[in-house]
Amino acid sequence: MKITRREFSRLVAFGIGTQLLPGIRAFGEDRTIGYCIVGLGRISMQHFMPAVKTSKKSRITALVSGHRGKAERMAAEYGVPSRSIYSYENYDEIRNNPDVDAVYIALPNSMHAEYTIRAAKAAKHVLCEKPMATSVEDARAMIQACESAHKKLMIAYRCQYEPAHLRAIALIREGKLGSIQSIESAFGFPIAPNEWRLDKKLAGGGPLMDVGIYCLNASRYVTGEEPSELAGFSSVVDEDGRFAQVEETLSWTMKFPNGTLASCTCTYGSSMPGYFRVRGSKGTMIMEPAFNYDNVHLSGQLASGEKLEMAPDEPDPVQFLREADYMADCILQNQEPKTSGQEGLRDMELMAQIYQSCEKKRI
Ligand code: NAD
């Protein structure tokens, strides 16, 4: 027999302990975290939700969508009761749903701030997709709202929980590559017209906000440092109407305090599978593919002759399972997520600086 947190609290209030009710599992024992999915789009329906379905720690307990029919179909598939389907208008009522511990926000970027702040006010934890927001100001407001409500805020940087990325970071910290001279990283894809990603109001920017953020975040976790200087260039090559509001391609260079230089490129104009390459005084490390949902591959060659090789056999959506369960652990153990709001804010500040640098160079 399993009881809800509310039922358990009521029993405790009446002085009935679990010792009197054999078979009842107390709140806290084998507890799972209930996620409310906010936005039923590609990342939530094709990756995050199927991942949670396989979890022992997390489950989907509520849905928020503007399309009732789609929400009902997904609710039937995931065993979510009809009463736990919300619209964007009555979303705040999740406050009264004891089965919702946290929300997973998978909306267009500019909506992340509003739905995070409303979740915090409804006393729910937040796992928010990247980029955290579309402005530094919004990112700060999200952190403030979650802090005031004493709720966790985690940004969904899935690569920071992926085993090959963790191994790469460990090898660099152990000094296997010697002093890190340079990082090259890129990520891009040819975008279809009429995507919300091309609407500056919804996206906040172009490929930098969407895919360049992977190169930026990786450069930061690879070096373990924050860039001290940066400079960028952006361009529109294809004058076909797609890039009236956002850049098509953007390249930038960052200098880190230890002297490492990182050169990154992102684009919506061509297929550019994500990678990063790290050149050190004692060897080279290559992560390629780096930012895919699966088939991540770490390789490299050290001056000592040793070869680096790691290709975790983790099919999609395992990265999303790791992320969902990590957040569940943070909630259950009351720990601050590694990729907290502060981590998201740092990328937001740097992306704002990269855009400023590109603007300054317009001829
Ligand atoms: P999507 O377009 O497939 O889904 C967006 C959802 O938001 C849809 O359900 C849509 O109906 C809803 N929506 C509500 N208001 C909307 C509006 N005004 N305009 C457009 N849609 C609206 O997008 P997606 O690719 O799933 O991306 C969602 C978020 O997830 C983005 O922030 C994106 O950066 C992030 N993302 C993360 C990863 C990752 O690997 N972590 C991958 C892809 C996307």
Image (cartoon, rainbow, N blue to C red):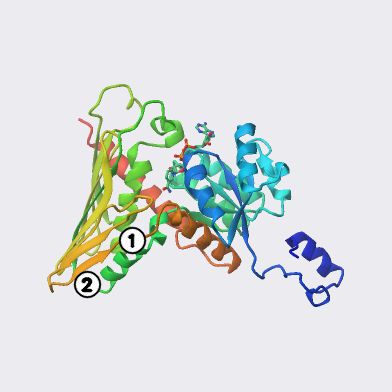
Q: Which residue is mark 1?
A: 221
Amino acid type for the residue under numbered disc 1: Tyr
Quadrant of residue 30 within the rendered picture: bottom right
Query: Residue 142, percent across and down?
Result: 53, 49
* Apparent side of residue 96 relative to residue 226 in the rendered image (left or right): right
Residue at x-position 36% and y-position 60%: 313
Can you say whether 361 is above or below 290 in the image? above
Query: Residue 92, percent across and down?
Result: 67, 43
Front-most of 83 and 232? 83
Q: Quadrant of the C terminus?
A: top left
Amino acid type for the residue under numbered disc 2: Lys
Can you say whether 120 is above or below 66 in the image? below
Q: Which mark is residue 332?
A: none
* Apparent side of residue 226 relative to residue 345 in the rendered image (left or right): left
Can you say whether 317 is above or below 28 in the image? above
Residue at x-position 41% and y-position 30%: 195
Q: Secondary structure at mark 2?
A: loop
Front-most of 324 and 119? 324
Q: Is residue 128 visible?
A: no
Q: Which residue is mark 2?
A: 176
Q: Is residue 198 visible?
A: yes
> Which residue sits furthest right?
14
Residue at x-position 33% and y-position 39%: 207
Q: Quadrant of the N terminus?
A: bottom right
